[in-house]
Image (cartoon, grey):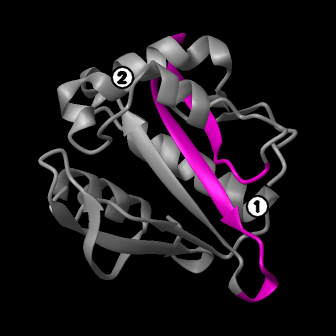
Amino acid sequence: MDIPKILSLRGQLVTLRLATADDAERLTEILLNPVVAEWWPRYDLARVRREMSNRPDDPDEAVVFAIEADDLVIGLIQYWEENEDDYRHAAIDIAIHPAWHHRGMGADALRTLARHLFDDRGHHRIIIDPAAHNHRAIRAYERVGFRSVGIMRRYERGTDGTWHDGLLMDLLRDDFV
């Protein structure tokens, strides 16, 4: 995938800007917070640098944005694309430091990225796949317009080492609120 020429996207409450190597330590700090790490397990600085650096030489990596509010990085949101014509869609993930939960920041970040994926990248469908027992995230995604598609059984390994179900959700352009 090509790294977007857009370096930042502005929402009502947050700004999304392409993450850089300078963000690695802050993103690691966010991902290591116990509330976040429950859903984003096994991250450390090396993994963040490897997976979240927006390397233009690796077109298969996700495009990662730092989420900023009040001039502080409060989380990350990323997307990747399936560009095969018959299956074209985008997928997203989001993590926000819990000190910024319940303020509408996540919903604003989701809407901002969804608008970009629909309007600028030409997608008609976006998917997200929270853990089936992550009810807080599921409610947040539903507020943006995502709908449950189905359970993916034993989809991901949890922090306890066992396999857990995931919930596939999607957002069609026509459902976007």
User: Residue 86, position in %: x, y?
Assistant: 75, 89
Query: Where, by quadrant of the figure, is residue 43 drawn?
Result: top left
Q: Element type at marker 1?
A: helix
Tell me which segment is drawn in magenta.
Answer: 59-86
Q: Residue at x 72, y 70 (%)?
A: 123
Assess whether residue 71 is covered by the magenta stretch: yes
Q: Is residue 8 visible?
A: yes
Find residue 11 and report its horizontal and vertical position in percent: 59, 37
Front label number (1 vs 2): 2
Q: Quadrant of residue 131?
A: bottom left
Q: On the rendered image, what quadrant is the N terminus found in?
A: bottom right
Callout 2: 10 Å neighbours few (<14), some, many (20+)? many
Q: Is residue 81 above or below residue 137?
A: below
Quadrant of the rendered structure where residue 174 is? bottom right
Residue under numbered circle 1: 119
Q: Kindly identify which residue carries mark 2.
A: 30
Does residue 15 appear anywhere in the picture? no
Which residue sits at x=79%, y=50%? Answer: 59
Instruction: Name the amino acid, label 2.
Output: Ile
Establish if 36 lies above or below 107: above
Asked whether residue 79 is drawn in magenta, I would say yes
In percent of width and height, residue 6 lies at 82, 38
